[in-house]
Image: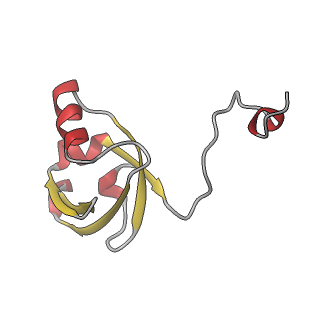
Amino acid sequence: MKLNEGQIGHTYLVEGVAVDETLARRLAALGVNDMTPVTILNKKGGGSVIFKVRGTRLAVGRRISDGVLIRDIRQGPVLPMHQEEGAIHGRK
């Protein structure tokens, strides 16, 4: 789901950032990295979002909020599809 599709007051985990490289580096410097929790504080018309990440409030427009992919923090961890049950526990 995209950042601008989340619900106000809910916390999500960042799954990825699909924006141009320069902007992705800037977001990473601000703490928007994979598996980082973000809480949506407010949403405005047109897709802009105000959210909290690592104790800091950030506001982004639609172009950026469309490129930040999130998932509900209440979902379990996502394991790579190629990882086998035995490999997880050190057995193969």
Quarter occupied by residue 83:
top right
The answer to whether residue 11 is above or below residue 36 is below
Position in image of residue 45 (x %, y %): 16, 62
Quarter occupied by residue 37:
bottom left
Position in image of residue 54 (x %, y %): 28, 59
Question: Number of labelled discs?
Answer: 0
Quarter occupied by residue 47:
bottom left
In this image, 41 relative to 74: left or right? left
Of residues 41 and 5, the one drawn nearer to the viewer in this rendering: 41
In this image, 33 relative to 72: left or right? left
Q: Residue at x 39, y 51 (%)?
A: 36
Q: Residue at x 77, y 32 (%)?
A: 87
Q: Residue at x 84, y 32 (%)?
A: 91
Position in image of residue 6 (x %, y %): 37, 61
Question: Is the C terminus in the top left, top right, bottom left or bottom right quadrant?
Answer: top right
Position in image of residue 62 (x %, y %): 19, 48
The answer to whether residue 17 is above or below residue 46 is above
